[in-house]
Image (cartoon, rainbow, N blue to C red):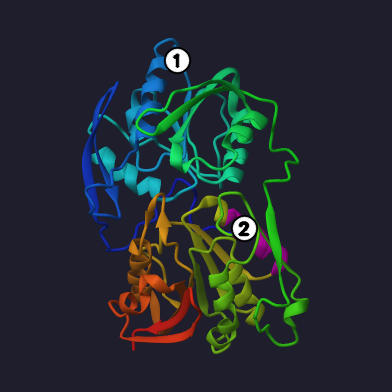
Amino acid sequence: MKTDALPFTVLLWGSLMPDLTTAVLDFPGGSLTLSRPGTDDPALRAWSAADELLLQAAFDHLETVTDARVLVIDDQYGALTLGLSRFAPDVVADNAQLSAALVTNANQNPGNPVPACIYSWLQPPTASYDLIVLRIPREADYLAWLLRWVNGALRPDGIMLAAGMIKHLPDRSVDVFADAVKVRQVGRAVKKARVISCSRGQATLDNWPGTWKGYELGKGCGLTAGPGRRPENLGIRVAAMPAVFAREKLDIGTRLMLPHLAAAIEPCRSGARVLDLACGNGVLGLAALAVKPDIEITFSDVSSQAVLSASRNQEAAFPGARAFFAHSDGIASNSEPFERILLNPPFHEGGVVGDHIALRLFEQASRNLTRTGRLLMVGNRHLGYHRSLRRFFSQVRQVDADPKFVVFEAWRG
């Protein structure tokens, strides 16, 4: 796998400065001034009640342990990492956004440094830990994967503290915990959040069938293949890890977009740079390679498990392709321009639903296309992307639509 960035590299959003909301978090170790990037809504803080519970429980536990080695998993904006900074925690996160958020928030809180290395699942930590602090994800499969990974990272007498907002806990979470770890205590609900204390269990990731799930990309997907290849004979198996969107079946937005890829990709010259932005399992980039195998394709996603999944799929389906991979929150500011950018933008971030992520990606795409470059994207009809795109592109054309999704082509003119 060729990558544009190691997990601990911060890829910037170019010149676009995110909106911020700032508030003060009080916790047993003091207080932190924390900003949440990407929104100016003062009701949206950079931490939740689950973070507060985790910090309280972690400080209570660490009072009784000396020289504990601590790991924080999937911190969002730095509340856990900076709150526990006196214990010099290691940090691993699937989301590339944490790196920039940590830098921003550490600058606002002198004496709370950013860890030297922020790991991702592209390059996870290999140490053993006395205490692991985990934000419970919304996806049951990702939670099950994390708990099995934790079993390999906890020392025999180590403790894991996991917390989440009750309304966001995944279905079957009680069973997921019971199947993987030894639950010691389930805390009472506080501010609609709950913390769970666990010891190491026996379940591991070795041969666990939940790590990879996927589907076949072939007949019925609407894709027109390249010369001499029929869609039903593409033989592309698209698989993904648990943190990846729509990993078990082709999502309906992408299905609407696929029939239009050939018209977008075929005019590209050999070696033309194409970007699968917010790539997920890489299905759009793989489809582009099926149309024109001699392009140079870059797969980029904020999720490290998505990058791993796209890399695995590309290597299996098109092992000789000129492919690159970036674990990045958007397009790096030093990127060379692309002839085509393919995009199915996320419309939610945690519990926040809206077009704020898409707007950032549209702006970056407009700055990172060649003179003749085009953006091909699909989005939810109700979000009104035809208006949003015109803020950044002089030419916007509706290519297709159904009751839920719309496909657009956009260029600068």
Mark 2: secondary structure: loop
Residue 341 visible to an observer of this rendering: no
Residue found 49% across the figure and 37% down from its top: 136
Magenta span: chief secondary structure: helix
Q: Is residue 381 left or right of residue 204?
A: left
Residue found 35% across the figure and 57% down from its top: 12
Q: Position of residue 50 (x, y in %)?
A: 39, 33
Res. 247 mark: 2
Q: CA distance from mark 2 to mark 1?
A: 40 Å
Span of residues in magenta: 307-319
Residue 271 in the magenta stretch? The answer is no
Mark 1: secondary structure: loop
Q: Position of residue 85 (x, y in %)?
A: 35, 28
Q: Position of residue 165 (x, y in %)?
A: 42, 37
Res. 67 mark: 1
Corner quadrant of residue 180: top right
Three-letter residue code for mark 2: Arg
* Image quadrant containing the N terminus: bottom right
At label 2, counting other C-alpha atoms closer than 10 Å, the crowd grade (few under 14, some 14-19, many 20 or more) is many
Residue found 74% across the figure and 75% down from its top: 234
Three-letter residue code for mark 1: Asp
Q: Position of residue 143 (x, y in %)?
A: 57, 40
At label 1, counting other C-alpha atoms closer than 10 Å, the crowd grade (few under 14, some 14-19, many 20 or more) is few
Residue found 25% across the figure and 29% down from its top: 111
Q: Are marks 2 and 1 in contact (CB under 8 Å)?
A: no
